[in-house]
Image (tube, rainbow, N blue to C red):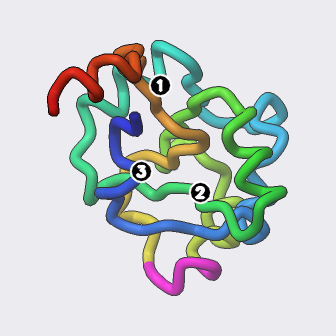
Amino acid sequence: MLKGHFTSAGASIEYGDAEVLFPVDDLDATVLQHRDAQLALADADGSAVVVVAPTSLATSYALTQHPLTAIAVDSLPDTVRAELADALDTSLEAFELVQIGKWSTDSPNRSLTEFTDSR
């Protein structure tokens, strides 16, 4: 089950247009991953988040294998912000975080007998 801002984000940028963000370990910016990213995204309003969106099955797979990551927009170098702003066709100043990956929660394990007993 998806959680977070993947469906309520203020904007999305296609995976190919966000290549300046990869690999995130090489970015000179505030990069939060895993639990830290969850906490940052939970505190952020959805309209202040830019989501990196898949454009194909391959990019979807790559993003689902990537740990949940939140990157502070104001900490990105000017050149990276300019490239992202060009891809978005809007100012990046309106956004607080860039989200990479999906924030998922555990869903209950269901049994088929649950549904057959309900007849």
Check disc 1 and report the residue beneath it: 37
In front of the other: 82 or 44: 44
Q: Earlier in the sequence, mark 1 or mark 2?
A: 1
The dot on residue 6 is 3
Nearer the N terminus, badge 3 or badge 1? 3
Note whether 33 is above or below 87 in the view shown. above
In the image, residue 79 sits, relative to residue 49, either above or below, namely below
Residue 85 inside the magenta-drawn segment = no
Amino acid identity at mark 1: Ala
Examine the residues drawn in magenta and state their main secondary structure: helix
Q: Which residues are magenta?
A: 86-90
When the figure is inspected, residue 86 is found, relative to residue 92, above or below; the finding is below
Q: Position of residue 76 (x, y in %)?
A: 61, 48
Q: Nearer the viewer, mark 3 or mark 1?
A: 3
Q: Which residue is mark 2?
A: 52
Q: Position of residue 103 (x, y in %)?
A: 46, 32
Please name the amino acid that badge 2 sits on: Val
Q: Gap in Å between the C-alphas at discs 3 and 2?
A: 9 Å
Residue under the image location 39 percent in, 16 percent down: 111
Image-quadrant location for residue 52: bottom right
Outermost residue to the bottom:
89
**Residue 64: x %, y % from top left:** 67, 39
